[in-house]
């Protein structure tokens, strides 16, 4: 597979073409002011502002071009006032030329850093798509919509995760939140997603599947690559099985916020009676250590899975996001519209930025 990185020097957008008029107008204004004030007042050194302004939005080549125009304007003013041979004018011209060279060099260095950052963002975006594949819009009788939003504006990858897999006449869904930090969280997410995708479609009993996931995280955390990460790697998760021909859902929760069902304007919390430890904590387990709890999931019901980044989002007054209240008030029946509505409302509640990553999966059981 051939990998193509972003272009090294993208063309100027329409907005940037308009911005070019600013340094050109600045050069013209300084020349006009210098001509009006007469030969005793020298405004030529102010021409350095034109290439400096260009460097904030233009390419290295454009910055050098505007800088050359500024130096040319300084020389032209010397000819007009007949002072090209004076030491004062020659010193000002040389100083302006050196300043332009410095600005152009700085812009070139900055552009290299921008290219490196663009490539890093591109690689992160590809890694996110590979790690956290978008869920199919339909699995059996289920309609699914997934959403991932990073807390950091520049981030594309994190520790929140979700996955779904078909297993005979049922669909298995997992949502989780890795508690490690940085690359540790990303590694744990990749490990858990790989274990789920490899095992879920084989249709082991749900408790056996969860025990397999727990032991995968546990044994990997026993010998972390970074000794400072000891004890930091664990995952809160909810693993569900939804049969095609039965109006129910089986849930095993491992320290994860309980799923919610929107049904006829009411919100039902699928709170298990005995939550298990997060995956990776404690000791190795077997299927005997887990028991799935069964809840009704009827035709037309809308099931919402989410990470704690949703319910722990605070407004400027410190109030947590009231997810269940919002769902009851909206009584939304379309998975995609529900996810979009939650995301917009969540950002409004949090003042436009999130303090934690957010992952959501909305599932509706449609007619067979």
Image (cartoon, rainbow, N blue to C red):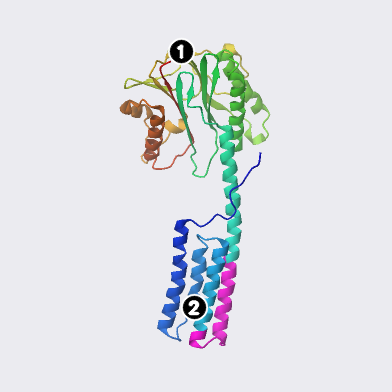
Query: Quick check: can you spot residue 32?
Result: yes
Look at discs 2 and 1 and give the one toward the viewer: 2
Where does the N terminus fall, quadrant-wise?
A: top right
Which residue is tagged 1? Answer: 294
Count neighbours of disc 2 (C-alpha within 10 A) and say few if under 14, some if 14 to 19, many if 20 or more: many
> Which stretch appears magenta?
79-103
Query: Quick check: can you spot residue 320?
Result: no
- Asked if residue 92 lies in the magenta stretch, the reply is yes
Q: Which mark is residue 32?
A: none
On screen, residue 94 above or below 55:
below
- Asked if residue 326 lies in the magenta stretch, the reply is no
Query: Picture coordinates of residue 264 (x, y %)?
Result: 32, 20
Count neighbours of disc 1 (C-alpha within 10 A) and say few if under 14, some if 14 to 19, many if 20 or more: some
Distance of mark 2 from mark 1, alpha carbons?
Answer: 80 Å
Give the SS element for disc 2: helix
Residue at left offset 39%, top offset 33%: 342
Give the SS element for disc 1: strand
Query: Picture coordinates of residue 338 (x, y %)?
Result: 39, 30
Q: Left or right: 12 with respect to 341? A: right
Residue at left offset 42%, top offset 13%: 247
Q: Left or right: 299 with respect to 70? A: left
Which residue is tagged 2? Answer: 44
Which of the marked residues, 2 or 1, is nearer the chain's N terminus? 2
Residue at left offset 64%, top offset 43%: 3
Residue 363, image quadrant: top left
On screen, residue 124 above or below 84:
above
Query: Picture coordinates of residue 122 (x, y %)?
Result: 58, 44
Residue 297, image quadrant: top left
Residue 25, image quadrant: bottom left
In depth, the one of 356 and 164 nearer the eye is 164
């Amino acid at each position: 597979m051939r990998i193509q990185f972003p272009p090294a020097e993208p063309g100027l957008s329409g907005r940037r073409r308009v911005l070019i008029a600013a340094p050109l107008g600045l050069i013209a204004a300084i020349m006009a002011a210098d001509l009006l004030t007469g030969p005793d007042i020298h405004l030529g050194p102010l021409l350095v502002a034109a290439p400096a302004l260009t460097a904030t939005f233009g390419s290295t080549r454009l910055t050098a071009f505007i800088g050359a125009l500024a130096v040319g304007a300084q020389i032209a003013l010397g000819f007009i006032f007949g002072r090209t041979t004076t030491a004062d004018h020659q010193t000002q011209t040389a100083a302006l030329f050196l300043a332009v060279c410095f600005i152009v060099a700085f812009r070139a260095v900055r552009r290299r850093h921008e290219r490196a950052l663009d490539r890093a963002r591109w690689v992160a975006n590809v890694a996110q798509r590979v790690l956290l594949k978008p869920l199919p819009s339909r699995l059996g009788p289920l309609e699914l919509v997934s959403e991932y939003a990073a807390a950091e504006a520049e981030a594309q990858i994190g520790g929140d995760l979700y996955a779904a897999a078909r297993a005979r006449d049922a669909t298995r869904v997992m949502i989780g939140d890795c508690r490690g930090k940085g690359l540790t969280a990303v590694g744990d997410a990749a490990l858990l997603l790989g274990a789920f995708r490899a095992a879920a479609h084989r249709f082991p009993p749900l408790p056996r599947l969860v025990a397999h996931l727990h032991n995968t995280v546990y044994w990997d955390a026993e010998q972390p690559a970074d000794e400072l990460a000891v004890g930091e790697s664990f995952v809160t998760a909810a693993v569900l099985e939804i049969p095609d021909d039965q109006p129910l859902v089986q849930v095993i929760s491992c320290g994860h916020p309980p799923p919610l069902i929107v049904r006829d304007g009411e919100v039902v919390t699928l709170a298990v009676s005995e939550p298990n430890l997060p995956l990776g904590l404690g000791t190795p387990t077997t299927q005997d250590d887990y028991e799935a709890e069964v809840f009704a999931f009827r035709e037309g019901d809308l099931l919402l899975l989410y990470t704690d980044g949703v319910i722990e989002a605070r407004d400027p007054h410190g109030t947590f996001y009231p997810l269940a209240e919002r769902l009851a008030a909206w009584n939304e029946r379309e998975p995609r519209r529900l996810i979009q509505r939650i995301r917009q409302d969540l950002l409004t509640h949090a003042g436009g930025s999130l303090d934690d990553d957010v992952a959501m999966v909305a599932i509706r059981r449609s007619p067979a």
